[in-house]
Image: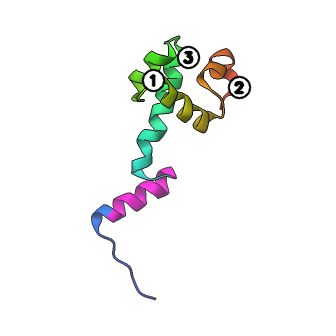
Amino acid sequence: MSLVVLDPLTAVLVGFRVAYGFAPSDYPRDLRPRRARALLAEGTAPSMAAAEAGFADQDHLTRWFSRTYGVTPAANRTAPQQVP
């Protein structure tokens, strides 16, 4: 059995993936929908929540929100307790 030596950057990337279940490049894609969801729960308008969370526009927020949570921001606003 041979020992594989990773360069430091690769070791960090692999360690991140093992610890969190996704690559570091996916981290912002995980944070933005969560930030938007929190803003929407506070009563922020969807267009403002999109901008503050780093989305290009409200449609961009809606697409990613639906992919992440399975519902649109409007559906989440009317029943936030049903979204995991």
Task: Say which residue label 2 marks.
Answer: 82
Q: Is residue 67 left or right of residue 24?
A: right
How crowded pointer 1 is (Cα within 10 Å; few <14, some 14-19, many 20+) is rated as many
Task: Say which residue label 1 marks.
Answer: 50
Identify the residue at horizontal 34%, vertical 64% (top origin).
10
- Per the model, the C-alpha gap separating discs 1 and 2 is 21 Å
Give the percent coordinates (x, y) of residue 39.
Answer: 49, 18
Q: Magenta residues, as a range?
A: 10-21
Identify the residue at horizontal 45%, vertical 35% (top origin).
31
Who comes first in sequence, dot 3 or dot 1? 3
Q: Is residue 20 magenta?
A: yes
Who comes first in sequence, dot 2 or dot 3? 3
Q: Is residue 26 above or below residue 64?
A: below
Circle 3: residue type: Ala
Task: Say which residue label 3 marks.
Answer: 41
Q: Is residue 25 above or below residue 42?
A: below
Decide whether the magenta segment is chiefly helix, strand or loop: helix
Q: Is residue 7 magenta?
A: no
Who comes first in sequence, dot 1 or dot 2? 1
Give the percent coordinates (x, y) of residue 17.
Answer: 46, 56
- Give the secondary structure at mark 3: helix
- Give the secondary structure at mark 1: helix
